Amino acid sequence: MGAVERDSAVEHAVSDHALVLKAQAGDREAFGELVARYMRRAYYAALGLTGSHDDALDLSQEAFVRAYRARASLDPDRPFYPWLYQIVRRLCFNMQRDRRTRRRRMEEATPWLQDQADARAAASDPARDVERSELRSRLEVAIDALPEREREVLVLKEFEGLRYREIAELLGIPIGTVMSRLYTARKNLAEILGDVL
Amino acid sequence: MSERGAAAGDERARRLLMRGLDGELPAEEREELERLLNSDASVRAEWDRLVRLKEVTDTMKLQQPPDEVWKDYWESVYVRLERGIGWILLSVGAIVLVSYGLWMGAQEIIADTEMPLYLKAAILATTVGVVVLLVSVVREKLFIGRTERYKDVER
């Protein structure tokens, strides 16, 4: 199990395949069940790509709306989430490319990462807590500065806990490309965070 | 070594570093990574830096939203679905009604023999302008916003 709760890893009485077929026939309850299964993954994917709770919520919900409208084009024999993820990422990339949105986000930036060492550090050493908070903030800025494809692979690996094979399947790229993008992303991050590493 | 050979060697080294860092390296390749780290100080320095970065990212996770978000999630998606259909029906209905009203009005104006020609021309110009703007706005909302903006995004 990865860092983010993986909805698809849970066993369900009704398969995705059956729900997709019902949704394609216009059954909104079946589609609602698919939403319930994948809303967390869609949200966290969007959060990793946009770095904003509001945008992640808005874009992940919009992705489900578009998925429902385009449900006729989905092959029920193929897994649902990779198809949904393509919609999520396109929405996120498009939003990120909008300069006005980027400017607004810079002005309204709120933390989107959570330091798991925060609570322990705060209890034992307030000075270290401030240091960790600064580190988290700098990491967020450094990830924001990465090109979208590098950021995407980094987020899928580090924060969603996917393996290389899973990332490759999700993005439809070779495993070698996953590793190359990850290397470049980490190299860039290490350079930006140089003095605190 | 040729440039291509050197590049391939670099690529091999990068992949070893990544897989070693992420624990996806089999035992035999683990030894290869160790040999590489021991034989090249610059690779060792890069490895150490990447390990420190990994230690930082391992302590971070994505911020969790409040539980209410999940309770209201499907409801929000459902409302958007309904509103989308509502907007399409409203737009189509409005276009038909406005077009019908304009057509009836135009017929009356044309039949009115007392109205000066320049006034008829002004009304016609205003009407055509409104229709063009209306169609343009509807077209933008229904089609351009959904398709054109995403055409440059590769899957």
Image (cartoon, coloured by chain):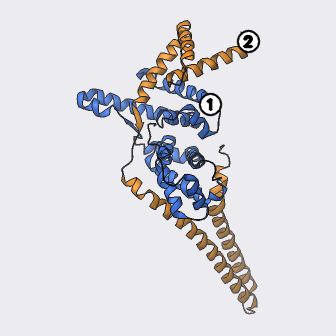
Chain colours: A blue, B orange
- Could you tell me residue B22's position as x and y percent? 50, 25
Residue located at (49% from left, 40% from top): A48
Residue located at (42% from left, 42% from top): A109
Q: Secondary structure at mark 2?
A: loop
- Could you tell me residue B151's position as x and y percent? 68, 49
**B9 lies above or below B140:** above
Name the amino acid type tagged 2.
Ser
- What's the mark number on residue A175? 1
**A143 lies above or below A107:** above
Residue denoted by label 2: B2
- Could you tell me residue A145's position as x and y percent? 52, 34
Dot 2 surroundings within 10 Å: few (below 14), some, or many (20 or more)? Answer: few
> Mark 1 near mark 2, Cβ–Cβ under 8 Å?
no
Residue located at (52% from left, 44% from top): A102
- Could you tell me residue B96's position as x and y percent? 66, 78
Dot 1 surroundings within 10 Å: few (below 14), some, or many (20 or more)? Answer: some
